[in-house]
Amino acid sequence: MRLKGVKVGFALTGSHCCLDMVLPQVQNMIIEGADVYPIISSAVDTTNTRYGTSEKWKEFLKGITSRDAISTVVEVELSGPQKTFDVVVVAPCTGNTLAKLANGITDGTVLMSVKAQLRNQRPVVLAVSTNDGLSMNAKNIGLLLNVKNVYMVPFGQDNPSGKPNSLISKWDLITDTVLDALQGKQYQPILVFY
C-alpha cells in the first residue's frame, strides 16, 4: 500500500471519452491506501454524452470513495486554508483546463482545487487529454512543465496519423507519477510511445 494515509484530491474534467479509462485509476489509488476526495468540473457534473451520463460518473465516484463529488468552487476553495490534500490529480486534464491553468484562470471547481493546492506549495499532477497538445496547447504544456509543484503524467501521441496534434497521458502511470511528485520529483520519461 504505497499511498497509505495520503489524501488525494482527484479532479476530473470533461474529456468524456477518457473517463472510463481514468476511473479505474481512482480505484487503484484506493487499493494503494489513498484517501480519495473526488472533484468534478461543471462539464462532468452536468453533461450527458454518448460516453455516459453525469449521474453515472457521480454514482461511480461515490461508490468507490464513499464521498459525494466536490462540484462547486465554494466547496473546494476551503481545501486551501484547511490544507486538505497532500496531492491533487487532474485526470483527464483537457486542453481548456491546461490553457486556463497556464494563464492563472480559476473560474471552475477543478481550477480552484489546483490554485488552492499550489498556494500551499503542494504537488499537483496533470494527466493530459487534448486534441491540440501539439498545436494550440503546446505552449501551455511547456509553461506548466516549468511551474513549481506541477508534475505531468507521461503522455504521447495516441493517434499520430488520424489526430497528429492529440496527446493523451498513460493513465496507468498516474499512481507512479503521484508517488514521485510527493517526493518533489517528475516521473520519467515524460514523453512515451503508444
Image: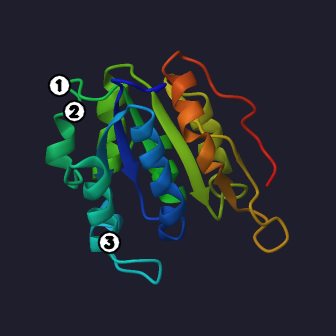
Q: Circle 1 sits on which residue?
A: 82
Separation of residues labelled 1 and 2 (CA atoms): 5 Å
The amino acid on which the numbered mark 1 sits, given as a three-letter code, is Gln
Residue 52 figure quarter: bottom left
Whichever of labels 1 and 3 marks the residue nearer the N terminus, that label is 3
Residue at 58% x, 32% y is 177
Q: Residue furthest top?
A: 183
Classify residue 175 as left or right of residue 187: left
Q: Circle 3 sits on which residue?
A: 56
Q: Is residue 39 above or below residue 142?
A: below
Q: Position of residue 117 (x, y in %)?
A: 33, 29
Whichever of labels 3 and 2 marks the residue nearer the N terminus, that label is 3
The amino acid on which the numbered mark 2 sits, given as a three-letter code, is Ser
Q: Circle 2 sits on which residue?
A: 79
Separation of residues labelled 3 and 2 (CA atoms): 25 Å
Q: Position of residue 143 (x, y in %)?
A: 60, 36
Residue 151 visible, this angle: no
Q: Position of residue 187 (x, y in %)?
A: 65, 28
Between marks 3 and 2 in the image, the one whose residue lies nearer the viewer? 3
Q: Which mark is residue 138?
A: none
Of residue 22 and residue 130, the one placed in the foreground of this image is: 22
Which secondary structure lies at badge 1? Answer: loop
Q: Position of residue 13 (x, y in %)?
A: 42, 58
Q: Residue furthest bottom?
A: 50
Residue at 34% x, 77% y is 53
Classify residue 95 as left or right of residue 73: right
Q: Residues within 10 Å of mark 2 (few under 14, many from 20)?
A: some
